Image (spheres, grey):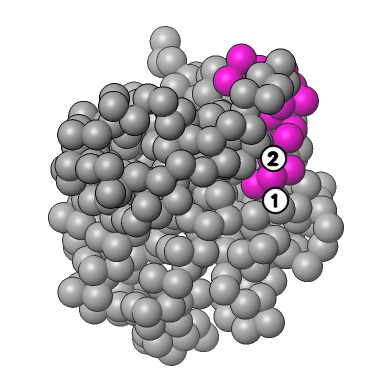
Amino acid sequence: MKAATLGIGARQVGEGQPCLVIAHVGTAHGGKPELARRLIDAAFQAGADAIAFPVFRASELVARRHPERRELEAAELSPREWKAVLEAAKASGLLVVAEAFDTASRDLAAEAGVDAFQTHPLDLDHPDLVRALAAGGRPLLLGAASDEDAQVGAALEQCGAGAALLLCPLTAPAAPEELRLSELAARRERYRVPVGLFDTTDGASAFALVAPALAAAHGAALVEKRLVVDRARKGKGAAAALAPEEFYRMVELLRQAERAKGDAFAPAARRGATARGRSIVAASLIGRGDVLTAERLLFKRTDERFERGLSPAEAHRVIGRRAARPIQADETIKEDMLE
């Protein structure tokens, strides 16, 4: 029987693990690499664990007279631009997910070093694409409408052990009842894979802030929500998106919901004053493989909602070691970030 856990990059996702929060940027970059980089920074600052980019070729995705053809063409990046954006996302320290719509996009994303692939729910009945993404050497987040069942089972069989199921209403914005949160536990028990939610409820509603927290309380292993720099801008999926400050609040509520469950991974309240002490943080961006010197470290009080990192007294354990992954400026340095 398959275990309901999955490794994505350096993270384990599933039973007994914190909920993985993914910022899905859709086409909010409008085909502008500089805006895509702003969204990467916004996702990191808002507390996301991962960022998801749809990688596509409009000519391969929609017919010439499709009403969204021009919009998709305007949002399409060149292979060189895609590679630069995906590599920038990797350098941010976020996990990077590519929602690939064809094999060429899959190969491009793989070359850029993404951590996982994702399928759109409308591609659940495209077995050739599902098999191609499952064979891409990365975990696969399989998008599916919450009322699908027979197709989900067949698709998961094609994926093997390296997959998670991401339930997603097909409407955006979706009504609260379309989330069907009770399906999260039911699907996890049925398929024995991590199950999460792609929340497409109205970003302008208060419910959009609490829906991911409710999903986490119902056992979601991962939650994905659209992120835009400015929700006032029109565009595909914008109505179901959150602005950075709203996304930050959403993550905060989700983490509070995890702590309310009392799971072992949630920060314990008994830490008291020790959680408010200073931790070692990066003075500036530290690249993967860079040697950490005293000049590259600072000692600051960090967010009490999250587990404290190494203390200033443990600086000798850090200096001289290499970074196992990119570490952002002001990010708390922990033992698992070091070689």
Part of the protein shown in magenta: 251-267
Give coordinates of residue 236: x percent, y percent: 57, 75
Nearer-the-camera pick, 204 or 89: 89
Q: Is residue 258 magenta?
A: yes
State left or right for residue 223 relative to residue 210: left
Report the residue at 23% width, 51% height from top: 287
Left or right position of 138 against 44? left
4 up-or-down from 277: above or below: above
User: Which quadrant of the figure has residue 98?
Assistant: bottom left
Instruction: Report the front residue among 50 and 320.
Output: 320
Q: Amino acid at mark 1?
A: Met
Q: Can you say which quadrant of the picture contains the N terminus? A: top left
**Would you say 338 lies left or right of 291 here?**
right
Residue pictured at 68% horizontal, 82% vertical:
232
Residue 141 in magenta? no
Q: Position of residue 329 (x, y in %)?
A: 40, 54
| Residue at numbered disc 2 | 254
Q: Spatial distance from mark 2 to mark 1, Cα to Cα?
A: 6 Å
The reply to whether discs 2 and 1 touch (Cβ–Cβ < 8 Å) is yes
